[in-house]
Amino acid sequence: MSFFKNLRNNCSFLVFLLGSSQQTAILSILTFCIELRHLNLGSCVRIEDYDVVASMLAARCRSLCSVDLWRCRNLTDRGLAELVSGCRMLEELDLGWCPTLQSSTGCFQHLARSLPRLRKLFLTANRTVCDSDVEELAASCPSLQHLDILGKRFPHTYSMWTQTFVIY
């Protein structure tokens, strides 16, 4: 039990190795890491339901500054909505190669309105990102410095920020 008490008081950064982590283990650890600031779950293929993990993060890890969910295959707009509503301190979020997130649900605009501190956002390989999503990010995220939408159908140069912002 002292291990978990120590984890609770001292854990601020967690990285789960590529594909090796099971959902039950992750949920158990997150229960104790209420002061967690940075979490990398990139390409953890053994997580059956990322929405459940997102819900846990929103409820228990409200001080998160960065979350990497690269290649999570089943995060839906509902899970993302819970995450961004509960973790409003997020400054960096990687949702690259997340095929179940679709712009038509309004999830990216909700993300923009919920995370005013956002500095970096990765939406790599999401071909559904549209101009209205980028416009909402520009309007709602004044600190945004890096937006990766590589793979978007039509790359544009946006000058909605004070400096011209090139989208990759």
Image (cartoon, rainbow, N blue to C red):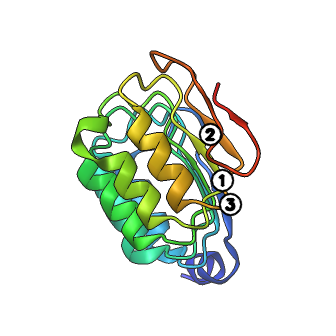
Q: Of helix, strand and loop, which one carries label 1?
A: loop
Tell me the distance, in whole angstroms, between the alpha carbons under discs 2 and 3. 11 Å
Q: Quadrant of residue 6?
A: bottom right
Q: Which residue is mark 1?
A: 144
Q: Quadrant of residue 73?
A: top left
Residue 49 can be seen in this image: yes
| Mark 2 neighbour class, 10 Å CA radius: few under 14, some 14 to 19, many 20 or more | some
Q: Which residue is mark 3?
A: 143
Residue 35 vertical placement versus 67 (above, below): below
| Mark 1 neighbour class, 10 Å CA radius: few under 14, some 14 to 19, many 20 or more | many
Name the residue rendered at 49%, 76% in the picture. Answer: 62
Name the residue rendered at 36%, 41% in the picture. Answer: 47
Residue 20 vertical placement versus 87 (above, below): above
Q: Which residue is mark 2?
A: 147
* Front-most of residues 32 and 56: 56
Kindly check if marks 1 and 3 are in contact, taking CB atoms under 8 A apart as contact: yes
Q: Is residue 45 left or right of residue 50?
A: right
Residue 134 vertical placement versus 85 (above, below): above
Amino acid beneath label 3: Ser
Tell me the distance, in whole angstroms, between the alpha carbons under discs 1 and 3. 4 Å
Residue 114 vertical placement versus 7 (above, below): above
Amino acid beneath label 1: Leu
Q: Is residue 163 left or right of residue 160?
A: right
* Front-most of residues 30 and 71: 71
Kindly check if marks 1 and 2 are in contact, taking CB atoms under 8 A apart as contact: yes
Q: Can you give x and y, in whole percent of width and height, for residue 50 in the image?
A: 33, 47
Q: Can you give x and y, in whole percent of width and height, for residue 53 in the image?
A: 36, 56
